[in-house]
Image (tube, coloured by chain):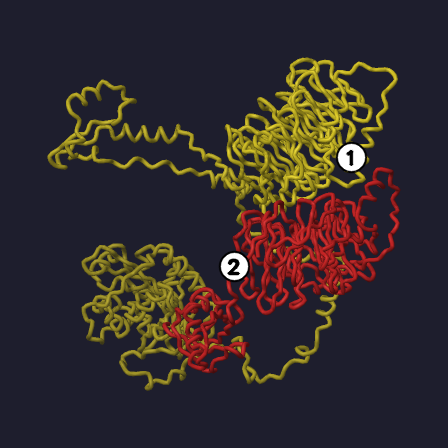
Chain colours: A yellow, B red
Amino acid sequence: MHAVSKSSEPRKTAKMSKSREKNTKRRVVEDDEDQLDLFKENKDEAPQKQVEKDGPSDGEDSDDSDSEESVFSGLEDSGSDSEDSEEDEEDFEEEASSGDENQGEGSSGLKTKQELSFTKKTQGKPQREKLLVKEKTTAGKTVVLKGVAKDNGTVQGEKKSKGQAIPPPQVDEYEHDTSDEEDIRNTVGNVPMEWYQDYPHIGYDLEGKKIFKPIRNKDELDEFLDKMENPDYWRTVHDKMTSTDIRLTDEQISLVHRLQSGQFGDVNFNEYEPYIDFFSGETMIHPVTNRPQDKRSFIPSLIEKEKVSKMVHAIKMGWIKPRKPKESDLQFYDLWAKEDPNAILGRHKMHVPAPKMKLPGHEESYNPPPEYLLTEEERLAWEQQDPEDRKLSFLPQKFSCLRSVPAYSRFIHERFERCLDLYLCPRQRKMRVNVDPEDLIPKLPKPRDLQPFPTIQSLIYRGHSSLVRCISLSPSGQWLASGSDDCTVRLWEVSTGRCMKTVEVGGAVRSIVWNPNPAICLVAVCFNETVVLLNPYLADKLVYNATDQLIASYVEPEEERPQPVQWQVPEIEDSDKGFRLIITHPKSVKQVTWHSKGDYLASVLSDNSNMQVLIHQVSKRRSQNPFRKNKGLVQCVSFHPIRPYFFVASQRCVRVYNLIKQELMKKLMANCKWISSMAIHPGGDNVICGSYDSRLSWFDLDLSTKPYKVLRHHKKALRGVAFHKNYPLFASGSDDGSVIVCHGMVYNDLLQNPLIVPVKVLKGHTLTHNLGVLDVAFHPTQPWVFSSGADATIRLFT
Amino acid sequence: MSQLQVRFFTENAKYKVDDVPFSIPAASQVQDLSNIINKLLEAKHTGHSNVEFDFLVRGNFLRTSLVNHMEAEGISTEEVVEIEYVQRFMAPQPEECIMHDDWISSVDTESEWILTGSYDKTARIWTQEGKAVMTVAGHTDVVKDVAWVKRDGVTSLLLTSSMDQTAILWEWNVERNKLKARHCCRGHAGSVDSIAVSPNQTKFCSGSWDKMLKIWSAVPTDKEDELEEQRDRPRKKQKTEQMGLTRTPIMTLSGHIEAVSSVLWSDNEEVCSASWDHTIRLWDVETGNMKSTLTGSKVFNCISYSPLCRRLASGSTDRHVRLWDPRSKDGSLVLLSLTSHTGWVTAVRWSPSNEQQLISGSLDCVVKLWDTRSCKAPLYDMAAHEDKVLCVDWREDGVRAHFTMSPTRSGTM
């Protein structure tokens, strides 16, 4: 509010103050509508306050006040002695002429209510401001404009006595002043002043006399002139209650300014005084008040207890759920929520940065070295080339200086090409299998964990004069029989290498086998077309005597059956050599083998006819040709160690026959060109085949007919293979002069495949006529391997 | 490090020198040290003749320069080094070569005679000078082992075992040079590869290829034991041709699962046997029970026991000579491995007089003399043989030890 009500004079009675104030306020609201709230403080006008208050007697502001005084002059006499009345009358005039809303008031005839308004023109500026101040003036000599009346509780705090520019101590402020007293110059009270429009007065003063309106009302022209001429017009307000114009003092204007800008009216009031926090959170040693504590402050509240118990019960019963924590308002859709962060093909991992462009080289220089510049022919060739075939996409050019280099015409084109490339080129990460090549090698146990196996050459059995084609160990392991191309069979003591016996036979010995039955001491030797059963007399006396008796106890059958071979009892001289039986075949025999029981004997004839394999029974001296027709050239045959199976190895495959059912059981495809030798695992379920194309094939009969493993360790043709009877060892001898010993563990568990680890290459034989090792054999009880070679020696490796 | 503080000491009072520290060059070899000792002894006794000494630093023979040896052994060179010196065991020289026309499978020495068994099915008795005194013929197969049993007066008892599955106890009258087969010990079912006579000379033990050990009485009697087996006529006829009375074993010790290669008596009640089943077993002769087993990893060819140091030495097919403590119960405690041979060790024999020396023979044609104080390398290699060495033996002759070894085709002394 711009309006400021002031109770400046203490001497007035306080009767109607309240009602009047209200009325005043309402009026001011009305006035507000057509008044500018802005006005400018003009320091120059400050002295005019005094003029207004002091009247003509005051000489300071004679110019301004004179004009006004002149206006009021007539009133002074006619009205009361007070200045207020003069002003009132003047206002009255003004109002009447201006035709303002205050005209009604003036007509009411009531006296003391005045509205004062005036306009003022500021110096040399077109801007004009109107200020409305409601003001109460007291009769008498002093006019006090109280700016702080509303703000301060002590309305009367500030006062200036008229005519006295004297400090307050001289005046007793409270002498004629009360707090609720109103400035009563017009006693009409809080009534609309329109009621006095038609009356010459506007109210009544304290004595009951009429307060007359000013004689001369200001009309529009007066108003305008006043506005033009009166420099204080802007600070002049019209008091409707008294119909006087009041010129506001500098203090009042500054007060108005402060209030308008929302500041406190009192200049000295410091709104930012430090705050004294009496009721801080800190615990004081003394109470803030001296008041004794209420009883209820330390007695637990029964009502609260009841409330709490109800809530506890409700919580227990589950009626009240604990408050859920408020979810955050911000809900975002997680675009990658379903993406697996560990996915190999995850988007974040599949990011492939665009390949970098090639950095410019010398030929791109504006001043390239001369060798980069194309000659004329090259340039022609370049031009004739298809753009795609060009090695360089541009022609290197030379410029004398960088300044003369023209703009690159293909820039946009090349940018476009680049973008097109990046867009069209599928950039995808190649899923590279990161495998350590070491991991691909099967985990084989170390050879030293597979001990024992033969590692070193220990003994050499010398005595033969030609290549030793075949060797065989006695079942006890004490003796070794060997057959050689020098037409002898030698029998050796294993432990010393002593040749115990040499038996002359009639031809190169192709095969020699010791009877596997320990109760029979017989060696089957084949040379030429003959198979000789030889008693070496190297065993327990009882055993070899029993063997002789067994052979001698043969009785001729009644009816002679046609035999494919001829059984003979040797002559005396042959008998002295140890020959016990001679089986003469129609063709030369290349292999002979015993059944594990020691009664049956199979021989292989090197013939392409139907009679290639013969099975002989020693005790009955009977022979039979088990196969009516042989497919291919039979290389070697072998009996199954346990079951009545018969293995026949032809050049390319091994056929397994069941001798009892007389049928073919299996055909093992060796995947090699020419099988040379074959050995059956003592368990009977695994077969190894050596071939002339330097392969060793391991067949697991429980698996397929294809080799379970093919070992290509030898460099030349394999000549002999052998299994050890007790140890998981097998050996192969080859034309390259070496014997390779492998660990071949066969598990009883059918689910576990055999473990084959090559453990040792044994060298010792010297190559003779491109032949190396011709036969290998294992010691029956020790992990020792014997090999016979073309260098006429037999070597023992332990 | 040019000088070392050493102090010499010896067990032999004859060669004692003053017990004072000497400062000698660190690079001194055995010969230098030996010269020093000889000089000292000459200064002490005027009549001292030069003697070769050998030196032991902390129980190991000095073979390189002193400083190298101490470096290898980790001995501090700051302190005074205690060096023991002994009279050097002179390098053996072949003294005598006994030529045999076949392989010699075994040899046994006695104070006066040498008994050899040969692959020509005979055994022979030789004098020290290599003169054949007697040929023991009677076996029908290779003689695998021979042993002297005892000698009283003019008669000596000797044993031969053969591949013909028998062992024969012979009585040899030295004066008349008459040999008589007293007993033919039958019972083995394989070649009898090894025999050993008990220390009290009343029993002997045989080990055979048939995996059995048999204990026999070594006392000749006139009573013939009955064989259980029924034999047919020709065999009986053959038996009558046999010399001596048939004798059957007192006890059979079975337990080996492979051929028994070597047997010996460690005392009167204990027999020790080595076998191809990689074990050495100790047997109690009184009860016939097996007492303990020492397990190796390879076939054992031979064992020898020294009552002086109570160690077993074994030679096996993995080319090592191993020393065992037969009293250890946990089975396989190898005390020492002597590694130098390059072939199977076929024979090993402790010195009867020196507790630290043993000889070994191998199929690599070398006989080696070992000292357990120098386990890295043998003392001497005796490479006089041209063929495989199958057996070796020591012979005690006063102070100096002769040893006889019998290789194939030649016996050298």
- Picture coordinates of residue A137, whole percent (x, y): 35, 72
Q: Classify residue A287 by image quadrant.
A: bottom right
What type is the residue that disc 2 sits on?
A: Gln
Residue toward you, A771 or A542: A542
**Could you tell whether A58 is left or right of A553 in the image?**
left
**Could you tell whether B196 is left or right of A15 in the image?**
right
- Picture coordinates of residue A714, whole percent (x, y): 54, 33
Residue A157 visible within the image: yes
Residue at 73% across, 52% down: B160
The subunit carrying tag 1 is: A
**Could you tell whether A253 is left or right of A557 in the image?**
left
Total tally of numbered discs in the picture: 2
- Label 2: which residue? B93
What type is the residue that disc 1 sits on?
A: Ile
| Callout 2: SS | loop
Residue toward you, A304 or A3: A304
Residue at the left extreme, as displayed: A400
| Callout 1: SS | loop
- Picture coordinates of residue A655, whole percent (x, y): 69, 22
Dot 1: few (<14), some (14–19), or many (≥20) neighbours within 10 Å? many
Residue at 72% across, 47% down: B137
Mark carried by residue A520: 1
How far, Cα to Cα, is label 2 from label 1? 49 Å
Dot 2: few (<14), some (14–19), or many (≥20) neighbours within 10 Å? few
Depicted A58 relative to depicted A227: above or below: below
Give the quarter of the figure containing the N terminus of chain B.
Answer: bottom left
